[in-house]
Amino acid sequence: MELSDLIPDNSNNWSVKNDFLMFKKIQNIPTCFISNEDIVYIFLDVRIYKQVLKLTSLLVNKGVEFYFTIPELSNPKGTEDLNDTTVLHYLHSYSKKEFFEGFRKIDFDLIYNLIKWTEKENCFDLVKENYEYMLKKVNHQDYDYYSNKSTYKYGEEIREEFRSLYRDIQISKIL
Amino acid sequence: MRDRAWRRYMEERIVIRRLTNKLHLGRWYWRGFEDANGVTHQHPFLSDYIGSPDYFTFKTHTTKKWDSRHKIKYSPNKNGAYYRDSGKNSKTREKDRVLFLKILKEYGIK
């Protein structure tokens, strides 16, 4: 499998450079790469969320094994704690409206993909810690004393989803 | 010539210019810059600003006559005075869009 096979549409903005599949949006942004084990890793990047969703649905249709990863991994500097950062980034992206609604539209389960990845890397213990951090972040509210109302940064649907998300994670783990 | 593709090209140029100005101003801010993915960059690049609130704000802004170097917007007749936002016969895409949205709201479509 080659990176040029993974281009989802006929747009001229796609290109292959330095072992990455790039998409041009003002500048070239890395979209995915293929690891030594022949597994495709997609960068969960909100900047190009439409292209990420297109690529995901293409890989699901092709039946290729793929996981998501953090956009900083395209930087040669890398990150200090890759597994921890990746788990947090999965959950952080799931809380984003673009991915939350987008993955639902293409009928793809991001959380199941996360569990599969943690089983591969043997780091399921990191999920609960990061989930609790994200739950706190998603449910954070600011109280407006002038209008006596609480405002949330995240939508109601996302907050409700996160309340029962850990139960879904455990069910996905058993299945 | 001045079709949708040309307008998009011009918009992109303007957004890049505005982002570059922002980049030079905020590059050495000690708290860094948090991008759309929630990652903090101490020394952000232009690509880190894509998807941030600034990026969308700079796309929404329209160029007025005093923003332009030639006192006019994209016109080849750069010598004459140009008041695109005033006058009885002024027709701009922005005004048409506002009118269109108003009609859509009247009919309950949007």
Image (cartoon, coloured by chain):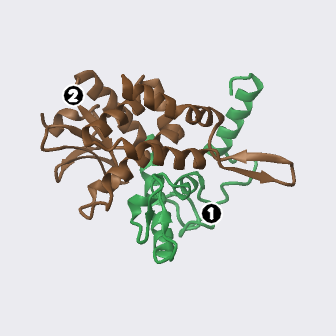
Chain colours: A brown, B green
- Residue designated by label 1: B65
Quick one: quadrant of the C terminus of chain B?
top right
- Which corner quadrant of the image does residue A170 belong to? top left
* Relative depth, front residue between B4 and A49: A49
Name the front one of labels 1 and 2. Answer: 2
Helix, strand or loop status at disc 2: loop
Residue type at numbered disc 2: Val
Residue A9 vertical placement versus B8 (above, below): above
Q: Position of residue B53 (x, y in %)?
A: 56, 55
Q: Is residue A92 visible?
A: no
Visible in this render: residue A15? yes
Question: Which residue corresponds to mark 2?
Answer: A64
Image quarter of the N terminus of chain B: top left
- Label 1: few (<14), some or many (≥20) within 10 Å? some
Is A39 left, or right, of B46 in this rendering? Answer: left
Q: How many marks?
A: 2
As helix, strand or loop, the secondary structure at mark 1 comes to loop
> Residue A85's x, y, as percent?
38, 53
User: Looking at the picture, does residue A30 appear above or below residue A63?
Assistant: below
Q: Nearer the viewer, residue B39 or B73?
A: B39
| Residue drawn at x 80%, y 53% as measured from the top left | A144
Drawn side of residue A175 relative to residue A39, left or right: right
Q: Position of residue B39 (x, y in %)?
A: 44, 58
Judging depth in this view, the residue of B97 and B42 nearest the camera is B42
* Image point (19%, 37%), residue name: A39
Q: Is residue A15 shown left or right of residue B46?
A: left
- Kindly identify the amino acid type of the residue bearing the numbered disc 1: Lys
For mark 1, name the chain. B
Q: Residue A14's spot in the image, x, y percent?
A: 26, 42
Q: Residue at x 23, y 30 (%)?
A: A65
What's the distance in space between the residues labelled 1 and 2, CA to CA?
Answer: 53 Å
Quadrant location of residue A175?
top left
